[in-house]
Image: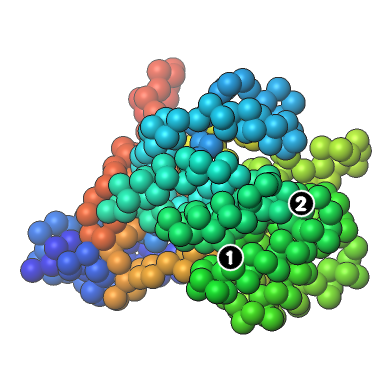
Amino acid sequence: MLDLLITNATLPDGRTNMSVAVQAGKITEVTPGLQAPAHETVDARGYLLTPPFCDPHFHMDATLSYGLPRVNESGTLLEGIALWGELKPLLKADDIIQRALTYCDWAVARGLLAIRSHVDTSDPRLLAVDALLQVKKQVAPYLDLQLVAFPQDGVLRTPGGIDNMARALDKGVDIVGGIPHFERTMAEGAASVKLLCEMAAERGKLVDMHCDESDDPLSRHIETLAFETQRLSLQGRVTGSHCTSMHSMDNYYVSKLIPLIAESGVSIIANPLINITLQGRHDSYPKRRGMTRVPELMAGGVTVAFGHDCVMDPWYGLGQADMLEVAHMGLHVAQMTSQQGIRNCFDAVTVHAAKVMHLQGYGIAPGCDASFVLLQARDSIEAIRLRATRLQVFSRGKRLAQTPHAIASLSLPGRPPETSLQP
Ligand code: FE2
């Protein structure tokens, strides 16, 4: 007897009337119309069953701190960084842990079961590192939390920055981060990319750097990141996050750069909600959008994923752990409104993000973990349009969350008493 059987599901690749059989936390079969005895059977009623959402770029040490010690009045990146500097000395480990756990609750409820979070290593106490390592352990049974050692103030610019990074990795942080465009000079930025990639190569770690989160078209650290990736044979293990300067770069230079990125196997993460609000702030009109070149990178063979980056923190006072909101913004900013473009945006918060994060056992196929989300939508395009209700969320065969169908009661003359807000 099966542990769980999902029937009549639509899959993201368009297959309908699919049954998904689950035994011991794993998917054992994905077949059209399969009926078999199971401890529990869920009729998906034709709705979309997707692998879980994945957020490949987040800042969990800062999340839900909105208003502490004050709000970001200008809403700019630079005031956000300054505000984070004011907040850091006031942070207490317990508060970080409680806010992070609350965020993880929101994430699970929205079918977001894997998060890669940067954690600031500029503070020599490494208080946030210890706090998030504890959260990682606590949520491990239901949420895959990866941590990136992130020298927010610059690994070379911060006294003791390299030592802090090494100690964070020693403590068990998974991934080497960086912020080359925030170092004092272009040369220092390039030097930071080199030394951090070498550190990752020596330790067998992945790399994920904030790279060129700038409107400066001459901020070209992504080029160095791609070069160092090849030099150190780190292909497939390195990610450039943000890469917003690419928006403003000269087209001729980009025609050389994208093949270089593709050749190096560096993946790119755009953060649409944050890029559209924080970039282009020195412009009058025309005002740049400031998100990296998503469709062009995808067409060039680069894996591109979308991250949430921030929720209710010094940089962004909005957000709700909803990766469909991220995909929705991404497709608008990148004008990816073709049918395939919208599907690619759905992939950017599911399969592409999982690939960037090196997740094992991800997908709806025999042998994969029985982790999936039933959405109140018929396909991925409708899911983004509606930011569809996450009807049921399963992790390794266990139901973690349920949300009722979105239906509104109406009191209108001559109209039915209720209307479904989603199909
Ligand atoms: Fe970030």
Numbered marks: total: 2
- Quarter of the view holding residue 108: top left
The answer to whether the residue bearing label 2 lies less than 8 angstroms from the nearest atom of ligand 1 is: no
Residue 290 drawn above or below residue 206: above
Q: Nearer the viewer, residue 36 or 99?
A: 99
Q: Residue 124 appears in which quarter of the rendering?
A: top right
Which residue is found at the position 86% from the left and 41% from the top? 287
For the question of whether residue 297 can be seen, the reply is: no
- Going from N to C along the chain, the mark reached first, 2 or 1, is 2
Q: Is mark 1 within 8 Å of ligand 1?
A: no
Q: Mark 1 highlights which residue?
A: 207
The quadrant of the image that shows the N terminus is bottom left
SS state under label 1: strand
Quadrant in which the C terminus is drawn: top left
Separation of disc 2 and disc 1 at Cα? 18 Å
Q: Residues within 10 Å of mark 2 (few under 14, many from 20)?
A: many
